Image (spheres, rainbow, N blue to C red):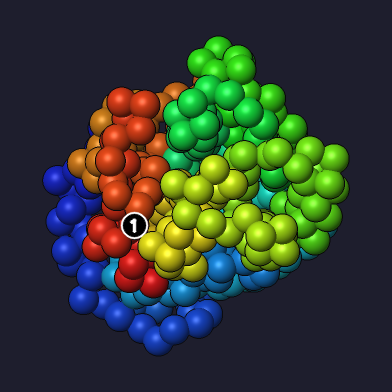
Amino acid sequence: MNHRHLLSAGLTVLLGATAALTTGCGDRSGDATGSGGGKPLIGVDYPRSDTDFWNSYIKYVPQSADELGVELKTTNSQNDIANLISNAQTFMSQGVKGVVMAPQDTAAIAPTLSQLENRKIPVVTIDTRPDSGKVFMVVRADNRAYGTKACQFLGTKLGGRGKVVMLQGGLDSINGRDRTEAFNECMGKEFPGIKVFGEATDWKADVAASKLQTRFASDPDIKGVYMQSSFALSGTLQILKQRELQVPPTDPKHVFVVSNDGIPEELKNIGGGLIDATVSQPADLYARYGLEYAKAAIEGKTFQPGPTEHGSTIIQVREGLLEDQLPAPLVTLDGAPIGGQPTVKFDDPSLWGRNA
């Protein structure tokens, strides 16, 4: 039977029955059949642990496992596709019944996905979507919307004129490509009077800081910065401070900064006037629904495109590939609409970064 919504009646009953089954934190050593209390064994590869966003995700995963009643085996590929491939082999040898991963190189993971499919081990990817290959479900937000929201914020604040720097993530990642393409397309269409300097950083903080410093040296009249992830936050703030540009938005010298993650530090910086906005990626929901879909796959459930009961929409990306696009709001100081689009105030209790 097809289930249109993740939290359908049958799954709701299932969650109610398993929510009370709790275990300790860390790896959960279930057997290959998941017979330890009937809990399925799921392998979760953490993509990296060098950013606040991913460290938050890592904390949420065991909490969600407790709530859903699943056993965990965990690895950390540390932003290295070779490590991820090796970790997937480890999961297979451990007898996991499902895998949750977030491949940062979304092209190179295809052969590993084929191996897992041949072993009848369903895969859920969170945050990223593989360029090819089969997975049971992709759990992410609309990354093109991230770029568009950042463009609309900066374009509106700059009155459609001036220069902005976009600190791009890795273009070997669907996320980096989506955010970059959408930002550029929006600027070209809606704010042609703004010049965009795209700086490739490969999600590396030191590269981002160096390129931003160089760009300010050649173009000191930069008025906006779009960081595609909070990896660039510290370096960007340091450079603005050095150049005596950390001034209120009412000051003509102000440089408008939009980030992307929604970590606690970003929310604090918005409140303190150090940055102006961020897009809140749902680290908590990535953890929950990554595991929930993996569990559903193990139990033989299927899904169809359409709205869910948890405020998102499942879309069909290509034949046989579904993606649950979770909400990711633009967060600002006052929560006022930007370019006719709603935003969320930085201290809104619904933001995961307020509760991390």
Residue situated furthest bottom in the rendering: 24
Q: Residue at x 65, y 35 (%)?
A: 164
Quarter residue 131 falls in: top right
Q: Which residue is mark 1?
A: 346
The x and y percentages for residue 79 are 73, 59
Position of 195 relative to 45 (above/below):
above
Q: Residue at x 34, y 67 (%)?
A: 354
Query: Horizontally, is 254 left or right of 88 in the view?
Result: left
Query: Horizontally, is 182 left or right of 56 in the view?
Result: right
Disc 1 packing (10 Å; few <14; some 14–19; many ≥20):
many
Query: Horizontally, is 45 left or right of 4 in the view?
Result: right
Q: Quadrant of the C terminus?
A: bottom left
Q: Amino acid at mark 1?
A: Phe
Report helix, strand or loop for mark 1: loop
Q: Residue at x 47, y 63 (%)?
A: 269
Q: Nearer the viewer, residue 172 or 95?
A: 172
The x and y percentages for residue 208 are 76, 52
Q: Quadrant of the N terminus?
A: top left
Q: Is residue 219 visible?
A: yes
Position of 18 relative to 109 (above/below):
below
The x and y percentages for residue 6 are 28, 43
Q: Residue at x 45, y 24 (%)?
A: 316
The x and y percentages for residue 47 are 65, 60
